[in-house]
Amino acid sequence: MTLADVMGVVQVLFLAYFVLLNGGYVMLNLISMITLTRYMSEHSLTALPQAGTGLEPPISLLVPAFNEEATIAASVRSLLQLSYPEFEVIVVNDDSKDRTLDVLIREFSLRPFPEAYRVRLKTQAIRAVYQSTDHPNLRVLDKANGGKADALNAGANVARYPLLCCVDADSILQRDSLRRVVQPFLEDPRTVATGGTIRIANGCEVSGGFLVRAGLPRNLLALFQVIEYLRAFLFGRMGWSPLNALLIISGAFGLFHKETLISVGGYRPKTIGEDMELIVRLHRVLRQQGRKYRIVFVPDPVCWTQAPEDLRTLRNQRIRWQRGLSDSLMMNRALLFHRKGGAVGWLAFPFILVFEWFSPIVLVAGYAFTLTAVLTGLLSPPALLAFLAVEIGLGVLLSVSALLLEELSFRIYPKLSHVGLLFLASLLENFGYRQINSWWRLVGLYRWATGAQARWGEMKRKGL
């Protein structure tokens, strides 16, 4: 076999992978369009002011906090103003090194409270429990440092209500978010977890802890992430949800049936991707038990979060995400092609394994091969055009279709100038941004494989 023959075979293999990868996303996109259209039709009246039905189960909001001195008071105040019949807020101070606990004590008139609770999930020691004298539904736990997963488990031990809503300390929820995200629990008693859409808050106007005007970031990196989040939620998670094959609910905003969460062991502190790992483990354990259940994505309860605006912070985030993905899949690999695996074990898991977990290797190798072949004259012009059409062209198609789904459904960005800017970003992100993300993900995969120590890194946040 000549070198030209080898190059031809490699070209076909790379091209086939890219076609299958993007073809899979196109199929998810089609499922999402059908599902979202049906959802919007069935929930068209929920945009009107809603009164409590009296059937909504009470919810415990768990808020892990570590070094959140600057924003914790505003965040807690906004949570206390959510529109829901009965809920409690449990802030877990995970041994912050700043004045987070002092701010909470001062702003909410906290007093030590002799709380009696059952320790069902093992955690680091809880030093004290505080109760607000101004807000009876606010409690604060002060504990030894154990990480986010450990803090959430501590909150679950103390929670009084049957549903747990896990929220990041810097998240901004819409006032009706709880009413919307709880709907699957009311409609189907088999529901064990639901998650809502995460949007980028950069460029938005926030007052009193609530978003009052949606806007777009001026920073190009943050703008590209707006497109990424539209793709990930509106046709990524929306596509898998009707198949009961959703493999991730964002750690920034997820609602869980408490007893089910505790029965599978709660959050796992030894993984850096605790949010995805929990969902994959729920699928694995409940499938193996033969239990009927639902894990649902709800597109309109919105949680707003800040996106990184500098390369270093974004790089650390993407490396961390890839390591979390690796942990989640490998720790629960028994789900893959399990005889009781259903759509999640036979479709979603292998798809994520091949086209998300393994893709950085193929993508980076594909780009390196293509560049080398072009420079050495071994790649024919038709082959180069085919590669660019599949990798770049279909990438643009997916981004634009996600933007189209947004405009046909929720129209968070109603201004024509916003739509035009997002359309431009959906084109530009394919030239450099997606490629460097593939490299960062490859670094994350390498660090996971070599067992390098995982670090969260510092998230640089700007005031909104």
Image (cartoon, rainbow, N blue to C red):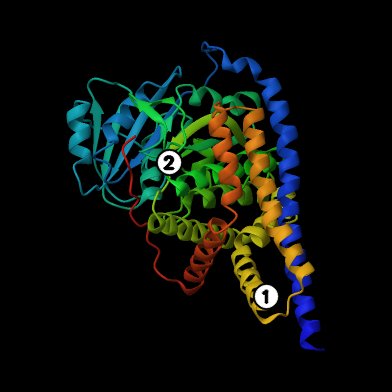
Q: Position of residue 115 (x, y in %)?
A: 28, 33
The three-letter amino acid code for the residue at tag 1 is Val
User: Depth check: 157 or 172 in front?
Assistant: 172
Q: Position of residue 233 (x, y in %)?
A: 59, 40
Work out which quarter of the rendered image holds the N terminus and state it: bottom right
Q: Quadrant of residue 69?
A: top left
Q: Which residue is mark 2?
A: 218
The three-letter amino acid code for the residue at tag 2 is Arg
Q: Which residue is mark 1?
A: 374
Mark sitting earlier along the chain (2/1): 2
Residue at horizontal 73%, vertical 75%? 379
Q: Position of residue 305 (x, y in %)?
A: 43, 39
Q: Does residue 318 sit above or below 63 in this rendering?
A: below
Is any part of residue 122 visible from this angle? no
Q: For the residue carrying disc 2, how many other residues have a C-alpha within 10 Å: few (<14), some (14-19), or many (20+)? A: few
Circle on res. 236: none
